[in-house]
Image (cartoon, rainbow, N blue to C red):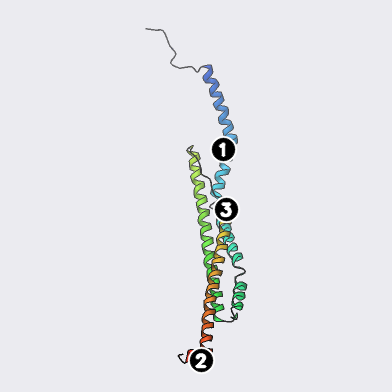
Amino acid sequence: MGGSSDPEIKDTEAQKALADVAKEQWRIYNESFIPAENQWIANVYSQNDADRYNAVAGTGNLAVQSAFKQMPAQLATGAASRGMGVDSGAFAGGLNTSYTDMASAISAAVNSGQIAQQNKFMTGLGNVAAVGMGAQTQATQSTGNLANMQNQYAINSAQNSAANNMGQQNLAGTAIGMGAGYYMNPNAQNGG
């Protein structure tokens, strides 16, 4: 049935050329892309460092304090325009409320910023896994976007607190005015 045959199959010249091309592409990939991928992966993991969360917390805290900075002066001006002194209980109550609102806003801004930072890290991890599987990645939020979000939240919180406190001062001023009017009107006191 046949003569001797060599059991080893030899590559053709075209297969050898393709193997050389693949070998060169693999070399380029290892020299160029692997270091970039490793740097990117290190950057993704650094998103979960305590320093990142502390920076986000500091930005949120500063944004809220800056937004609330003018609150005592605004309350004093509002109280004075309604005839209330800064030593009145209504003013002290409004000031206390504004500081409570500021503490709540700081807590909310810090928490939301840190949650956004955690989401950024988790999205990055998902992207690392996706690249490893050859799948599509997702965009991650930049640190600048986090700071803008915290600043806008701080401004809104300060404005809402100021509006609420001014409304309470208006109510207190109206009550004081009505009480004074009742006291000064002898007809109202005598039932007629």
Q: Please tell me which residue lies in front, 44 or 69.
A: 69
Q: Which residue is mark 2?
A: 186
Who's the residue at 55% across and 71% down the image? Answer: 98
Q: Please tell me which residue lies in front, 26 or 147.
A: 147
The type of residue carrying mark 3 is: Asn
Q: Which residue is mark 1?
A: 34
Q: Please tell me which residue lies in front, 190 or 17.
A: 190
The residue mark sitting in front, 2 or 1, is 2
Tag 2's secondary structure?
Answer: helix
Q: Please tell me which residue lies in front, 119 or 100.
A: 100
N-term mark: 3 or 1: 1
**Relative to 41, does residue 4 appear above or below in the rendering?**
above
Q: Which residue is mark 3?
A: 145
Q: Residues within 10 Å of mark 3 (few under 14, many from 20)?
A: few
**Relative to 1, does residue 94 appear above or below in the rendering?**
below
The residue mark sitting in front, 3 or 2, is 2
Tag 3's secondary structure?
Answer: helix
- Residue 192 in the image: state x and y as whole percent: 46, 90
The type of residue carrying mark 1 is: Ile
Tag 1's secondary structure?
Answer: helix
N-term mark: 2 or 1: 1
Q: Residues within 10 Å of mark 1 (few under 14, many from 20)?
A: few
